[in-house]
Image: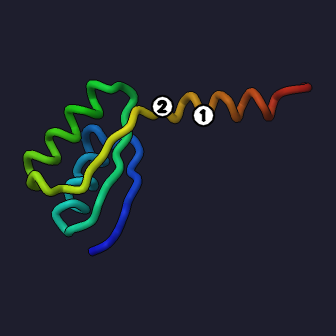
Amino acid sequence: MSQRTLITGSTRGIGLAVARAILVAGGSAMITGRTRESVDAAVGSLQATTGAGARVAGCVLDVRDAISQVVDVTTFGD
């Protein structure tokens, strides 16, 4: 599998399980979370369970910030 996947909200729960499944299938995953600590922990967990060669990276991203910016732009001038 040469699939590259971006999974938001993937430091726990369903998102983390999806990232793990993609890595096990041979794909690569970019995961996101709201805090550096949660992202680092999830990347470490994925590497530990899928092997040191797992192609996984993580970044801090809070989609609530992006949504609030869109709302600010769309309500501007009201």
Question: Residue at the location (8% across, 50% down)?
Answer: 49
Residue underneath mark 1 = 66
- Compared with 60, 48 (above or below) is below
Instruction: Tell me the amino acid under the disc marked 2.
Output: Asp
Q: Position of residue 8 (x, y in %)?
A: 41, 45
Q: Along the horizontal axis of the image, is 3 left or right of 17?
A: right
In contact (CB < 8 Å): disc 2 and disc 1: yes
The local secondary structure at tag 2 comes to loop
The residue that appears at 81% across and 29% down in the rendered structure is: 75
Instruction: Determine the residue positioned at 32% across, 26% down.
Output: 36
Q: Is residue 4 above or below residue 58?
A: below
What's under tag 1, amino acid-wise?
A: Ala
Q: Locate residue 26: give its quadrant.
A: bottom left
For the N terminus, the quadrant is bottom left
Q: Residue furthest right?
A: 77
Q: Is residue 31 left or right of residue 47?
A: right
In the rendering, at what x and y percent does residue 7 appear? 38, 50
Q: Quadrant of residue 21?
A: bottom left
Q: Nearer the viewer, residue 26 or 20?
A: 26
How crowded is the residue under tag 1: few (<14 C-alpha within 10 Å), some, or many (20+)?
few
Tell which residue pokes out farthest to the bottom in this image: 1
* Separation of marks 2 and 1 at Cα, in angstroms: 7 Å
Q: Picture coordinates of residue 45 (x, y %)?
A: 14, 41
* Way the structure is coloured: rainbow
Residue placed under numbered mark 2 in the picture:
62
